[in-house]
């Protein structure tokens, strides 16, 4: 199913696993909220899987877990700024720099505006989202998703915290209990107002530029700068007992406000090792386990094939060794065997010679004809055989236990050959003799 680019699922992550997680689906095409709600904690992110399946997912990181600061850039380090930034901040940070993810938000001349967040924290967020089957397009500090005013701060209360945006790259999340102290520390415009009713207070907030001489004298007496052109634009009811210069804006759902800002923002903390994968990897991901299994099968098949080839090579080498041994035994006058083809040619030549070149004059036809006769007289053992092709005779030297065995052999041979039997002699228990055979004409 195609991903809807006009609808976004925005999730504000939590600092702790047990904190609530507000979420909202915003349609920029329809300019309205499609759905919204709040999960009890991060373990329930999988309940948003159906909303995430068809939409881009934007994650808002709590500003309280992110340090938004700036640092001076040394001369000559501009080209390697991303690599240099962590070391420029090392003296200002109490933690090991290797445990922190440093992201460049903006560069203004020799000043770099950066966001710093723990690797452990960002990995926990991304792991929780990944376990819920969500692919995050952006990860942004929530405070920097508030609307930006050229002069002044932007503030909105979300749960028990106030999100305050000071500039394009500066913002904080402050607990209600110490919001006033933080504003004083920032030299925010403090208006010393007498104790009046709510209507007087609202009238003052709606007319930030109308201060009388008494107010200005009181500011001077208190040594607080008169920053009448800086106001705090608030989208939720302003806090009590913080006499700053507040200016009410049209009330909106805070998550709707953040979703719009996140959609328009170009900021994204997912850089370096957290850079989003290209689109094609997203479609490959479901097949990752199948690919791994297929890879293991292919690896096993290749390994089996390699072992099989090695076994066949070893067997072939054994055959070559044995064939060379037989060759040297049969043809002792050939000692060098340069190639297997040479061995084959010599063997074929010798077989052709012994076979008589295809006629009945070679040795092999003789042996084929004699084999059934020899089997009939197994008591006779042949110790030597000599074939003379020019004379057309075969001389056999044999031994037997009795004279009658030679007589039996001579009778069988005489049926097919001209037999000339030599003198027989007995030595011990053996009778030795020779037989010469010729073919009958």
Image: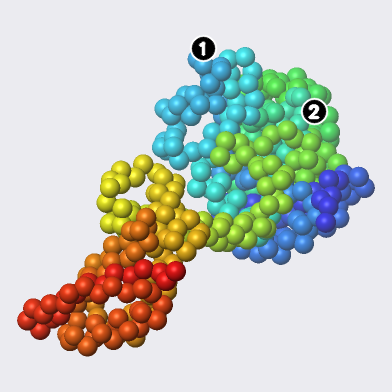
Q: Which mark is residue 208?
A: 2
Q: Secondary structure at mark 1?
A: loop
Question: Is 250 displayed left or right of 190 in the figure?
Answer: right
Q: Which quadrant, please, contains the C terminus?
A: bottom left
Q: Residue furthest top?
A: 75
On screen, residue 302 above or below 202 = below
Q: Position of residue 88 (x, y in %)?
A: 47, 24
Q: Residue at x 75, y 19 (%)?
A: 213
Q: Residues within 10 Å of mark 1 (few under 14, many from 20)?
A: few
Whether residue 357 sits left or right of residue 217 in the image: it is left
Looking at this view, is 193 or 424 the one in front?
424
Q: Position of residue 302 (x, y in %)?
A: 51, 56
Q: Which residue does the image show at 75% across and 40% down from the upper left?
A: 262
Quarter of the image holding residue 330?
bottom left
Which label sits on residue 76? 1
Nearer to me, 51 or 193: 51
Give the vertical position of 427 relative to 164 (above or below): below
Asked whether 13 or 346 is in front, the reply is: 346
Q: Which quarter of the picture shows residue 418?
A: bottom left
Q: Which mark is residue 60?
A: none
- Nearer to me, 86 or 67: 86
Residue shown at 55% from the left, 49% from the top: 123
Count of picture labels: 2
Q: From this viewpoint, is residue 394 visible?
A: yes
Q: Is residue 126 left or right of residue 365?
A: right
Considering the image in quadrants, where does the N terminus appear? Answer: bottom right
Q: Residue furthest left?
A: 428
Q: Where residue 179 sits: x, y (%)?
A: 62, 41
């Amino acid at each position: 199913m195609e991903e809807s680019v006009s609808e976004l699922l925005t999730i504000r992550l939590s600092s702790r696993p047990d904190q609530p997680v507000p979420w909202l689906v915003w349609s920029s095409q329809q300019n309205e909220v499609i759905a919204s709600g709040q999960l009890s904690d991060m373990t329930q992110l999988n309940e948003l899987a159906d909303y995430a399946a068809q939409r881009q997912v934007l994650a808002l990181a709590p500003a309280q877990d992110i340090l938004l600061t700036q640092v001076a850039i040394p001369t000559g380090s501009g080209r390697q700024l991303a690599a240099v930034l962590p070391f420029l901040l090392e003296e200002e940070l109490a933690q090991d720099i290797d445990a922190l993810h440093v992201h460049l938000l903006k560069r203004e001349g020799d000043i770099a505006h950066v966001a710093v967040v723990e690797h452990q924290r960002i990995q926990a967020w991304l792991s929780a989202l990944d376990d819920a089957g969500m692919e995050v397009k952006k990860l942004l500090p929530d405070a920097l998703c508030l609307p930006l005013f050229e002069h002044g701060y932007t503030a909105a209360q979300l749960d028990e915290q106030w999100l305050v945006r000071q500039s394009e790259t500066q913002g904080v999340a402050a607990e209600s209990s110490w919001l006033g102290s933080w504003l004083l520390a920032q030299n925010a415009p403090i208006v010393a107002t007498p104790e009046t009713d709510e209507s007087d207070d609202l009238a003052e907030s709606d007319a930030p530029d109308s201060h009388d001489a008494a107010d200005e004298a009181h500011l001077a007496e208190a040594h607080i700068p008169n920053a009448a052109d800086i106001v705090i634009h608030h989208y939720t009811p302003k806090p009590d007992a913080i006499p700053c210069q507040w200016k009410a804006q049209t009330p909106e759902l805070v998550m709707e406000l953040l979703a719009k800002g996140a959609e328009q923002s170009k900021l994204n903390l997912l850089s370096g090792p957290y850079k989003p994968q290209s689109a094609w990897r997203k479609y490959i991901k479901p097949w990752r386990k199948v690919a791994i299994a297929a890879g293991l099968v292919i690896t096993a098949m290749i390994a089996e094939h390699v072992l099989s080839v090695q076994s066949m090579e070893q067997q072939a080498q054994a055959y070559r060794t044995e064939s060379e041994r037989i060759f040297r035994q049969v043809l002792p006058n050939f000692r060098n065997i340069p190639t297997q083809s040479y061995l084959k040619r010599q063997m074929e030549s010798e077989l052709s010679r012994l076979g008589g070149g295809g006629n009945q004059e070679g040795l092999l036809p003789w042996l084929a004809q004699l084999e059934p006769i020899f089997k009939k007289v197994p008591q006779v053992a042949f110790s030597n055989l000599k074939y003379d092709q020019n004379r057309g005779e075969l001389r056999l030297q044999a031994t037997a236990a009795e004279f009658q065995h030679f007589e039996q052999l001579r009778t069988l041979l005489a049926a097919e050959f001209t037999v000339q039997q030599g003198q027989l002699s007995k030595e011990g228990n053996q009778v030795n003799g020779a037989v010469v055979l010729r073919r009958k004409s």
